[in-house]
Amino acid sequence: MRTSTPSHRLFVALPLAVMVFGVSLHDVFFPASAHVLQAAPTVALQSTPGTLLSASGATIDFRQGTALIVSKGLVRVTAGERVLQGFSGGFEITRDASSLTVAALTTPVLLTEGGRSIIVPAQSQSTFSDAPQALQGLPESYLRDRLMVVSHLMSDLDAASSSTRTDDLALHEDMRAGKTALSLPLFVHTPDRWLLASFHPELRDYAWVLPEPVGVTEEQRMLRLHMLIPSDTLPDAVSALAVRQWQQGWSVLLASRKDPFGKYLTVLLPIFKQQMQQIDSDRSPERLERYINAVQKIAQPYQRYLAPEAAKTLQEIVALKDVLPSSIGRGDENNIQSSSSHSSIDPTILIAQAKSLLQAAGFMFTSETAWQPEEGSVRVRDAVIGGGTGDQLVTFLFDPSTLAVRAIQKDGTVLPYALELSKYVEWMHKN
């Protein structure tokens, strides 16, 4: 293999790998023609002969050939005008004179070109030339072999110590220790990191309930919303709470467009239908029903105004429930509601969920706003919401799983009834 990087920047790590994994490693995991390199303390890669690249730390300039890249932190790869990013996982890229193929393995890949962003979700691939091809799944035999390589290269990286503990490494280590919620908010401080976390198999359920970082564009927000269903193909489904956030995101976006007659929803409904038709209703009936229910709620405010063709498309989406087993239906929603009484939910996650949902609904928070978990709900003190007479400080008990607002304090008394979040906001705007 030829590289243009000085030897102190990029060194061959194959002898170390063989010592760790044994002599059978070469025959079982790595093709005889492959080279294994450690480009940085946090990045390793396997490449084929003829591959041209240079590396400086966790940044790689990739010119031609094929390389499988594994990183325990954030890695950035430039391929001409295109920039690819991944985090805590592996992906493979192939580049020739006319195209670039990306196979995302255990991390999603965020590709940026000319201000435009594209997500390749984990366990899928796409080829980019003049225009990106549709996402495709990965062949089982290919995926199985590459996952074994990623696992062993990642083990090698984890065994090596790092002199600095960045936000990237802190999150990677917390993920391994089952403490993702502790450091994820520190990691997602840029739009690119926010997008990566929103589709990473180990981070997405947490990332979807966090507030978006400063600087997110409408295009990035739309990309995140458009890609959730196509990315939900892994054995473990996206959580019901993340789907609820997806639904809330679309509802907020549609409301912000000041389109009371749902003209933009008319464009979205065929896309939703096509995406949901790709979900295997036999293997993932709960997954499909979650999205059907979410789309019904997104469409509800505009249903009476939809054009006949759009109304028909919505009916066809709802009709997808007809292929679901009879045991599926109300059970998923019941599970969501019953989860509110589950005392083992991480308080950090619970508060993050509450903040994200309330922020999306129009609440603002100050240094005086207090958050206290209480058996699956969060007691919110001194949040700010716009009312009929100006901004008001409000205190209440909020359940993120059901969107129920209870124990509402009003004029020194606690109201005896509960309101759904959107109804509470509407009520506050009138008072």
Image (cartoon, helix red, strand yellow):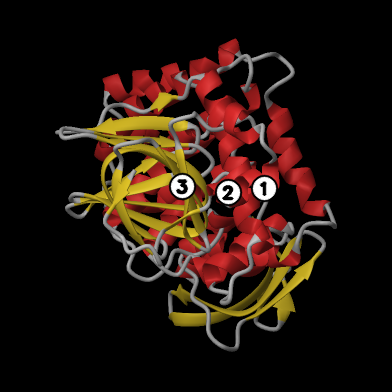
Q: Vertically, is 76 above or below 143?
A: below
The amino acid at mark 3 is Leu
Left or right: 282 with respect to 261?
Answer: right
> Residue 115, can we see it?
yes
Q: Nearer the viewer, residue 119 or 214?
A: 119
The residue that mark 2 highlights is: 15
**Residue type indicated by callout 2:** Pro
- As measured in the structure, the alpha-carbon distance from the residue carrying label 2 to the one carrying label 3 is 14 Å
Q: Residue at x 52, y 36 (%)?
A: 294
Which residue has dot 1 on it?
19
For label 3, the crowd category at 10 Å Cα-Cα, with few meaning under 14, some 14 to 19 and many 20 or more, is: many
Q: Given contact means CB atoms under 8 Å apart, are the residues at marks 1 and 3 in contact?
A: no
Residue 180, position in %: x, y?
A: 66, 60
**Residue sitting nearer the eye, 229 or 246:** 229
Amino acid type, label 1: Met
Circle 1: element type: helix
Q: Are marks 2 and 1 in contact (CB under 8 Å)?
A: yes
- Name the residue located 53 percent from the left edge and 27 percent from the top edge: 143
Residue sitting farthest toward the right = 343
At which x and y percent is residue 6? 32, 64
| For residue 19, side relative to residue 117 (left or right) | right
Can the viewer see residue 131 in this picture? Answer: no
- Give the residue number, with chain letter if any, for mark 3: 45
Dot 1 crowding, Cα within 10 Å, few <14, some 14–19, many 20+ = few
